[in-house]
Image (cartoon, helix red, strand yellow):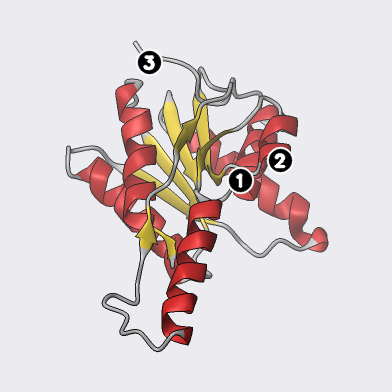
Amino acid sequence: VGMDNSLIGQNVADHFLNRGYRNFGVYSLDTEVFFQERVRNFVNTVESIGHRIEVLPATEDHPDSWEENQQTLIRWLGALEKPVGVFATTDQLGTRVLDACQRANLAVPEEVAVVGTENDETLCGFASPQLTSLEFDGMRVGFEAADLLQQMMDGREVEDPITLIPPKGMVVRASSDDLVI
């Protein structure tokens, strides 16, 4: 039981497209298959209508390399055609993007709109500006997993052992609350 990563990438792409964005970036993690699925589906959705995307894989988060990583992110953001919608595959990466924008004097969301994933309310709320994020339905994942486990413990046949839960929806905050004209 898990999140439907195909819908995650598509929902974020739709959010940017509905706001008029035509330039896109992805700040991604490649450490897990589900991160790769999110990115692949975001990229496929945007490219299917003829837009290009620049992807920057995040490097390991280590205190000794923080400044170097942020400088790489600043250079990447500076090179993107503006206005640009940047999809961060986690809220933690989204806050890194916001920090890099602030350091580079890039206006959010006017020049760089940012959307994270997972809707960590504390992280999103304390970010500056507050981070838009796609909210997961963690409670439903838990209930579905418990139900599946109960079926197995009862010795019942499980028809489909894989259950993918759609995200709840976009929680729009200041980091992407803009329309491109």
Instruction: Say which element carries label 3.
Output: loop
Pick whichever of labels 1 and 3 is earlier in the sequence.
1
Residue 54 location (% of width, % of height) = 39, 46
Residue 91: image tag: 1
In the rendered structure, are the residues bearing label 1 and label 3 in contact, judged by CB atoms less than 8 Å apart? no
Identify the residue shown where x is 49% and y is 54%. 140
Q: Quadrant of the N terminus?
A: bottom left
Q: Which residue is mark 3?
A: 180
Measure how far apart labels 1 and 3 are at the Cα level: 23 Å
Q: Amino acid at mark 3?
A: Val
Identify the residue shown where x is 39% and y is 39%. 12
Pick whichever of labels 2 and 1 is earlier in the sequence.
1
Identify the residue shown where x is 31% and y is 44%. 10
Q: Label 3: few (<14), some or many (≥20) within 10 Å?
A: some
Q: Amino acid at mark 1?
A: Asp
Circle 2 or circle 3, nearest the eye: 2
Q: Which residue is mark 2?
A: 123
Identify the residue shown where x is 31% and y is 24%. 18
Q: Quadrant of the C terminus?
A: top left
Residue 39 location (% of width, % of height) = 39, 54
